[in-house]
Image (tube, rainbow, N blue to C red):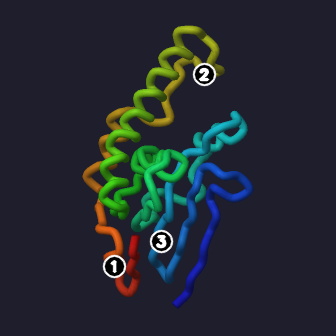
Amino acid sequence: MDIRIKFLGGARTDTGSKYLLEIDDYKVLIDCGLFQGLKELRTRNWEPFPIEAAEIDDVILTHAHIDHSGYLPRLFKEGFRGDVFCTSPTADLLEIMLLDSAKLQEEEAAYAAKKGYSQHEKPQPLYGTEDAESVFPYLRPCEMHKKVIIHNRIEVCF
């Protein structure tokens, strides 16, 4: 078994948690967080994702905080279509938090356009409400302390 891990966020900072675990030809992203805080961190959310989103098979979320889950709508927008494994409470919170995050981003883009402070002619949100809603059918809520087989010989336990 060939196992590799790539740190795509959450390294040298405490935000934007994303770790790509590759087990043979299976790719699972552990956490999928937004970078928050200083502008130099937030702008990383707009950079191209380091691998093709469609190459990722699944996502495992450790918890619902936006710096661990908030990039999910963008990942789906870029072509990811795998399952998102998380606890049931995390799934419940995601529906509230991702919709709220999308609304805030839409409002911020509209305000930037109105006030003219964006460097873009027509400011856009990182993702919108429809993008957030596209995540929900792929959530796979799991029970605590119960092993879940997510692929071949790979199981997780929250």
Three-letter amino acid code at disc 2?
His
Quadrant in which the C terminus is drawn: bottom left
Taking the view exactly as shown, the residue that stands out farthest to the top is 115
Where residue 56 sits, quadrant-wise, is bottom left
CA distance separating discs 1 and 2? 47 Å
Residue at 48% x, 17% y is 110
Three-letter amino acid code at disc 1?
Lys
- Residue 65, given in percent of the width and then of the height, sits at 49, 48
**Which sits earlier in the primary sequence, circle 3 or circle 1?**
3
Relative side of 27 to 148, left or right: right
Relative side of 91 to 15, left or right: left
What residue would you read off at disc 3?
Answer: 27
Taking the view exactly as shown, the residue that stands out farthest to the front is 145
CA distance separating discs 3 and 1? 19 Å
- Residue 73, given in percent of the width and then of the height, sits at 41, 45
What residue would you read off at disc 1?
Answer: 147
SS for callout 3: strand
**Which sits earlier in the primary sequence, circle 1 or circle 2?**
2
Q: Are marks 2 and 3 in contact (CB under 8 Å)?
A: no
Nearer the observer: mark 1 or 2; the answer is 1
What residue would you read off at disc 2?
Answer: 120
